[in-house]
Every structure is written in structure tokens, then in C-alpha cells.
Image: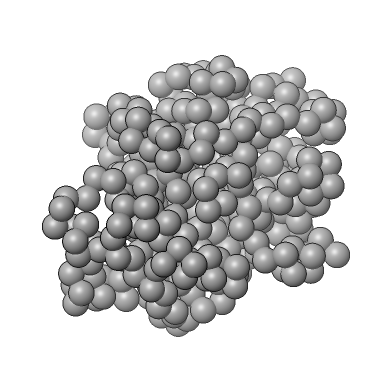
């Protein structure tokens, strides 16, 4: 794996870097979920991470490696919400300026939280404007260091620490189900799983409306799509990254998709049976198990619940 952007050693180093700052989130089980699927399911509850999502891991790992000059200049990022909050909180903890580019239709709770962590928020129209162009322009104009939401080795390594903790706690799973947008979380997960659980089947799960990763792996190239219209706002990416794609191509066994309706059913399950809030994107992996999109019966299955940031009014609307 030396030709890939990250190695297991990078994830291990990230784990040491974020220790005592990021939460070691719980691994939860449900006898009802096991009975529903005929499997032994282990849910890594990153919805209970600081700022409500796994993104804090990669955000803090990235900013903690800034040079003094970069720290003085500050950080800029673009995100629909969770990476935004992760960078904003990490910047506050490390005492640096943060500018975050967010879509104007991002969940209000995510915009408010990002501002609450002290970041300057720049809004844009995700359907007509290019956030990457805006980010590069502002970085050049204001001397900021750009940390993208997934396509960065330090981000990818930090995200891998969630799977590292999961496998350290439950041992090697037979199957690992991971939400997939741009591939940062799945990249880190795959590197860890291949090292610690070489026989594990690694599956990425993305929304039906945005199956660019599935198509990319099938075609052997990065496929670009229009911004997908899905309730899984954390997976409304248009393409995989130049760093994440090679990792997924080499290490991931399969990418499957689930519908928005199936995400809602998973949200209902977590709220009703496990008494916790999981956002639509966070339910991607679980929905693949619940619906049989991935055959899990008789298997030990690790599932990453990537986040829990959703407006309560929107949550109520979706599950009504």
C-alpha cells in the first residue's frame, strides 16, 4: 500500500494525535437489529462524536499538523455541514481563524453550529456555484490553508481512527459497512480493515441518487455527476477524490446504494428502538444491512454511523 495516499501507520499516528481530544465513541448493539438481519451487528456511534460526526477526527488531525505559519494564516474549508463544524471546532481548540464555505440550503442546525464554534461562514448555491473554485480563490486572497472535506491524506488518516477503535473493541468483523460520499471515511476504514482484518469484506454505501463511486469503481476512473438530490446531505458529493479513489479501487470490495426511503426507515429504527438520533447520511451503512442490500445473515458486521446532525423539525418531517 506504499503507493496509496495513506498507510496504517498514518492512521495509528492520527489516533495518538487526537487521543484525549476526540471522543472514543461507543460501539452499540441491538438484539432487535440482530433478529431483523440474522447477523451480529456492531454500530460505531460517531453520531456521539464531538460536534456530532466522525469528521472531527480528520479535521483535528489535519489542523494539528499545521506549521506555525499556516496556523497564523488560518484555515478555509468547504462543506455541507459536518466537515464545516469539525474544522470550526478544531480551529477554535487550536487557536486559529477559520473560514467555512457552506451551501445556502445546508441544514440550519449545521450552519448555526459552525458559526457557534467561531468560524466565518460564506454561503453559496450548491447547484450553480463551484465550492472548490470559491475555496481556492479565497485561500489565495487571504493566505488561508485549504483543508478539503475528504480528499486530503491527513483527513483520510484521521477518519480511519473510527474503524481502528471499532476493530480494537470487537475484533475482526466479517463485513464492514461504511457510508460513502467523497471517500474519506471509507478510505481510512479500508486501510485499517485490510491491516487488522484482512479477510473482512469492505463495502461502501452511497445514496441511489448519487452513485458516482459505484460507477467510478466499475469504470476504473473518477466519474463526475451533478449534485445529487438526496436527503443524505453529507453524501451530496459530485466525485471521488484524487487521493481517495486509488484507495477505494485497490482495497474496497463493493459499493452498493440505498434509497432515501430506506434511509428514513433506518432513522426510525435508531430513534424508536435504540433511542438515538442518526442523520440520513449516517444511516447509509445500516440501511444496507437492514434491507438486505448486502447479505449479512450469519455474519459479524461492523457498521459506521457517521453522524447525527439534523434539524429536529426536518427529522420530524422525514419520519412523519
The answer to whether 217 appears left or right of 143 in the picture is: right
Front one among 138 and 63 = 63
Quadrant of the image containing the N terminus: top left
Counting from the top left corner in percent of width and height, residue 185 is at 46, 43
Front one among 177 and 279 = 279
Counting from the top left corner in percent of width and height, residue 268 is at 80, 51
The answer to whether 33 appears left or right of 117 in the picture is: right
Residue 320 image-quadrant placement: bottom right
Tell me how the rendering is colored: one colour
Q: Residue at x 44, y 80 (%)?
A: 124
The answer to whether 284 appears left or right of 180 in the picture is: right
Counting from the top left corner in percent of width and height, residue 118 is at 41, 67
Tell me if residue 215 comes above or below residue 4 in the rendering. below
Tell me if residue 12 comes above or below residue 269 in the rendering. above
Asked whether the viewer can see residue 250, the reply is: no
Counting from the top left corner in percent of width and height, residue 110 is at 55, 66
The answer to whether 293 appears left or right of 25 in the picture is: right
Q: Residue at x 43, y 28 (%)?
A: 192
Q: Residue at x 51, y 21 (%)?
A: 168
Q: Residue at x 26, y 75 (%)?
A: 138
The tally of labels here is 0
Asked whether the viewer can see residue 120, the reply is: yes
Residue 96 image-quadrant placement: bottom left
Residue with the most extreme left position:
69
Front one among 3 and 172 = 172
Amino acid at each position: 500500500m506504499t503507493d496509496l495516499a495513506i498507510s496504517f501507520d498514518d492512521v495509528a499516528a492520527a489516533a495518538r494525535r487526537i487521543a484525549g481530544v476526540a471522543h472514543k465513541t461507543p460501539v452499540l448493539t441491538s438484539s432487535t437489529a440482530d433478529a431483523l438481519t440474522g447477523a451480529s451487528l456492531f454500530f460505531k456511534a460517531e453520531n456521539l462524536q464531538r460536534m456530532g460526526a466522525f469528521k472531527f477526527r480528520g479535521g483535528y488531525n489535519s489542523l494539528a499538523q499545521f506549521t506555525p505559519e499556516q496556523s497564523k494564516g488560518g484555515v478555509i474549508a468547504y462543506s455541507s455541514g459536518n466537515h464545516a463544524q469539525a474544522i470550526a471546532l478544531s480551529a477554535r481548540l487550536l487557536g486559529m481563524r477559520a473560514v467555512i464555505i457552506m451551501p445556502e440550503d445546508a441544514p440550519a442546525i449545521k450552519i448555526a453550529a459552525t458559526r457557534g464554534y467561531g468560524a466565518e461562514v460564506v454561503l453559496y448555491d450548491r447547484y450553480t456555484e463551484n465550492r472548490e473554485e470559491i475555496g481556492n480563490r479565497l485561500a489565495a486572497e487571504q493566505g488561508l490553508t485549504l483543508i478539503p472535506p475528504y480528499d486530503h491524506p491527513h483527513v483520510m488518516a484521521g477518519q480511519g481512527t473510527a474503524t481502528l477503535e471499532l476493530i480494537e473493541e470487537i475484533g475482526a468483523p466479517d463485513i464492514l459497512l461504511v457510508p460513502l460520499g467523497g471517500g474519506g471515511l471509507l478510505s481510512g476504514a479500508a486501510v485499517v480493515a485490510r491491516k487488522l482484518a484482512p479477510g473482512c469484506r469492505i463495502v461502501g454505501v452511497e445514496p441511489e441518487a448519487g452513485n458516482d463511486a459505484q460507477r467510478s469503481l466499475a469504470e476504473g476512473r473518477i466519474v463526475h455527476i451533478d449534485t445529487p438530490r438526496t436527503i443524505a446531505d453529507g453524501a451530496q458529493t459530485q466525485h471521488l477524490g484524487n487521493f481517495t479513489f486509488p484507495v477505494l479501487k485497490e482495497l474496497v470490495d463493493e459499493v452498493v446504494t440505498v434509497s432515501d426511503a430506506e434511509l428514513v426507515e433506518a432513522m426510525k429504527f435508531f430513534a424508536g428502538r435504540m433511542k438515538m438520533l442518526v442523520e440520513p447520511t449516517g444511516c447509509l451503512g445500516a440501511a444496507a444491512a437492514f434491507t438486505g442490500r448486502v447479505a449479512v445473515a450469519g455474519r459479524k458486521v461492523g457498521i459506521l454511523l457517521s453522524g447525527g446532525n439534523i434539524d429536529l423539525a426536518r427529522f420530524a418531517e422525514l419520519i412523519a
